[in-house]
Image: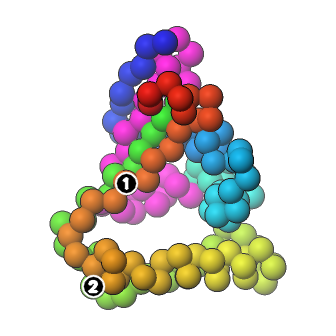
Amino acid sequence: MTFKLHEQTRDDEFAGIIDCENAGYSEPFNGFWEILRGPSAEELTERQTMWHSLDPSSRWLYVTDEATGQVVGAMEWNIYEENPYADGVPDFPADWWPEDSPLRKISDYVLKEFLKDRPHVMGKPHVRMYPKTSTTSQHNTI
C-alpha cells in the first residue's frame, strides 16, 4: 500500500476528507461526533469548507491510498500567532440542527461546555491539530 501526502488547496477536496472523518469517528459510537457531524455528509462538507475559508489559521493536510485514491487520513492544523481567545469564547451555536429541536438544544449546551475553558487553556499563541483517520487505515501507520 502506497500513500501520498497532499495539502488541501481546493474546496472539492473536502468531500474525501469528510468521508474519512465519518469512517473514523462513527464506529465505535461517538456522541460528540454525532453532534458535530450534523444531518448529512453533504451539509458537513459545505459547513467545513465554509469554516476553513473563514479561518486564516486553518491548514489541512491529508493522505490518500495511491491505489484507490481514497483519503485514509487527514489533519487540520490551526496556527495561532496571537491569542485567539483575547475576546473570550466566540458564540458557536449548532445551527446545522433545526432551531428549537431537542438535538439543537443539547448540541448548543455540549459545545458551550466543550469550549468554555479554551481562553484559560489556549489563551496564547499555539498550534492546534485535529486528526482524522478512517477505521480501515488506523493500524497502517497513517
Residue 103 lies in magenta, yes or no? no
The residue shown at (18%, 66%) is: 81
Give the answer, above or below, for where 110 lies relative to 7.
Answer: below
Q: Indicate left or right for 125 with 49 as reference.
A: left
Q: In this view, which residue lies farthest toward the right?
A: 102
Query: Can you give x and y, in whole percent of width and height, for residue 89 in the image?
Result: 41, 83
Q: Is residue 60 magenta?
A: yes
Residue at 49% over, 52% down: 49
Q: Are marks 1 and 2 in contact (CB under 8 Å)?
A: no
Q: Secondary structure at mark 2?
A: loop
Give me the residue at 64% from left, 58% from top: 33
Residue that badge 2 annotates:
86
Q: Residues within 10 Å of mark 1 (few under 14, many from 20)?
A: few
Vertical placement of residue 140 versus 35, above or below:
above
The amino acid pointed to by label 2 is Ala
Specify start and end residues of the magenta stretch as a single range.
47-71
- Label 2 Cα neighbours within 10 Å, binned few <14 / some 14-19 / many ≥20: few
- Where does the image place residue 129, in percent across and percent down from the top left? 37, 54
Give the answer, above or below, for where 1 lies relative to 24. Answer: above
Left or right of 64? Residue 41 is right
Which residue bears the numbered disc 1? Answer: 129
Residue at the location (47% across, 83% down)?
116
**Residue projecting furthest to the front:** 139
* Residue 10 in sight in this render: no
x%, y% of residue 95? 64, 73
